[in-house]
Image (spheres, rainbow, N blue to C red):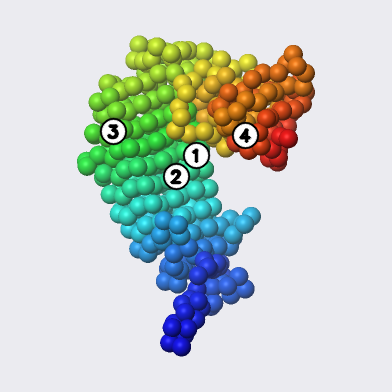
Amino acid sequence: MIFKIALLGFAILPVSAANYYLAPQGADNAAGSINAPWKNLDQAQNKMGPGDTVFVRGGTFAGVNLNWTKSGTAGKPMVIKAYPKETPIFTGSGLNYFVQSTGQYIVFDGLEISGYTRSAFNPTGGGFLTIRNCNLHNILANEYGAITPQNCHDILIENNVFREMGRSLDQTLFDHAVYNAAGSHDIVIRNNLFMNSHGGPAINHYHTPSPYNVLICNNVFIMTLGAERSGVFVGDGAHDVKVYNNTFYLDGKGATKCYGVHFNSGFGTNEAVNNLFYFSNWPIDDAVILPGNDKADYNLYFPAKDADDAGAHSFAADPLFADAAGTDLHLAASSPAINKGMTLPSFAFDKDGNQRPIGGGFDIGAYESKDGITGIIGRWASGKRASSGSSRKSRVSLEKGSLIFFDRNKSPAIQGTEPGGFDAFDTFDAKGGRLPKLSEPE
Ligand SMILES: [Ca+2]
């Protein structure tokens, strides 16, 4: 009998993640429900446990300075997320920080943050922190970054917009969008848009102990304002920083410093590969990339590649953007950047989230071109042979691991010999839009 009661007690413990709600007009003595939301993130932290989500409703929250110390777990992060199709706006009103944190397994998703004088996010310990889909702008970042990891690890920064960072248009300062500092490591910065970091390089690495193990991929940098219009700086012993498949659109006119990537530490461990450097009004004697002793290759330069810009497979050409003047930096169908990149197995998508590679190989820059490919894209994962094409003449044998891509208008069917043989099975319409996944071919 005692055993049965104990079992019952175990069974009624909460086992599912809870959803809570926060709104500017809420109250902290409310239930935290959608009809009775809380007002302050502090109250959310007090009540939340691992796996819980607080949905933040649209509207303005002024003067929030949050010290987040609680942790989720590996499978159950604590999530602070914009309510669907609403925009919660946090304005700093002159405060230094929006969030400082020492907790682990925390996700911030979909928030707009502006007006802070140092950082939107300043984790000073802990790790496994994700910041995604946020709109970070007009942060002074006074010798910091809008995101400044210090003494922490496993940070994912993805799909955010960073714009108008720094104290001044006219000074060369040390204000950044992301500043990896003080021994932080295992950081991924991917699929973000960086616009106009006025005061210093958009992504900065400095301060001993050095940051390390950083992947910077699929980002777009558009810098047209300010004295400092640089992309990525890696210094003061920072190492194992990999800068892959980014697009840099920098206007060098009037800039006191203007480069895409500058390595001055790392001693061979840093890499800049498959990046597209487009410099308008570029002073020809300035380097676009300063590799130091580190690796740089398979990069495309416009208008020119000078002696500092290393790499046997790098070349200078007009990349032929979809709309350079309008800063639509997707590649036109005739772009020389298509299929000219190095194969990098560590990631399999581009800035739009589409599969990479498509066609004959990796493209250079943040976007993989889909032009000319309107059919089925997949990978033959089976060990057995399959064939494609609707006529005997057009059939092609597919070995295990083969990429499959062809024009639907010419080859309306794949005839597989084994169910379950395909993975990454996606289709696109004639404009490159993603269609619902197909079922397995019969
Ligand atoms: Ca390609």
Q: Residue furthest bottom?
A: 1
Q: Is residue 373 above or below residue 13?
A: above
Amino acid type, label 4: Gly
Residue under numbered circle 2: 157
At label 1, the amino acid type is Asn
Instruction: State the residue lying farthest toward the left.
Output: 208
At horizontal 60% and vertical 28% (from top left) the residue drawn is 384
Q: Residue at x 42, y 24 (%)?
A: 273
326 or 431: nearer the eye? 431
Q: Can you identify the residue that label 4 sits on?
A: 421
In three-dimensional space, the C-alpha distance between marks 2 and 4, rounded to whole angstroms, equals 34 Å
Q: Residue at x 60, y 36 (%)?
A: 423
> Which of disc 4 and disc 3 is earlier in sequence?
3
- Up the image or down, 187 lies above or below 2; here it is above
Q: Position of residue 30 (x, y in %)?
A: 53, 78
* Amino acid at pointer 3: His
Mark 4 packing: few (<14 Cα in 10 Å), some, or many (20+)? many
| Of pointers 2 and 4, the one earlier in the residue sequence | 2
Name the N-terminal-most of marks 4 and 1: 1
Of labels 3 and 4, the one closer to you: 4
Residue 364 higher or lower than 215, as above or below: above
Q: Eyeballing the image, is 301 above or below 180?
A: above
Q: CA distance from mark 2 to mark 1?
A: 8 Å
Position of 182 compared to 190: left or right?
A: left
**Front residue of 368 and 308:** 368
Return the x and y of residue 49 as percentages of the image width and height: 44, 68
Q: Residues within 10 Å of mark 2 (few under 14, many from 20)?
A: many
- Residue receiving disc 1: 192
Q: Which residue is mark 3?
A: 239
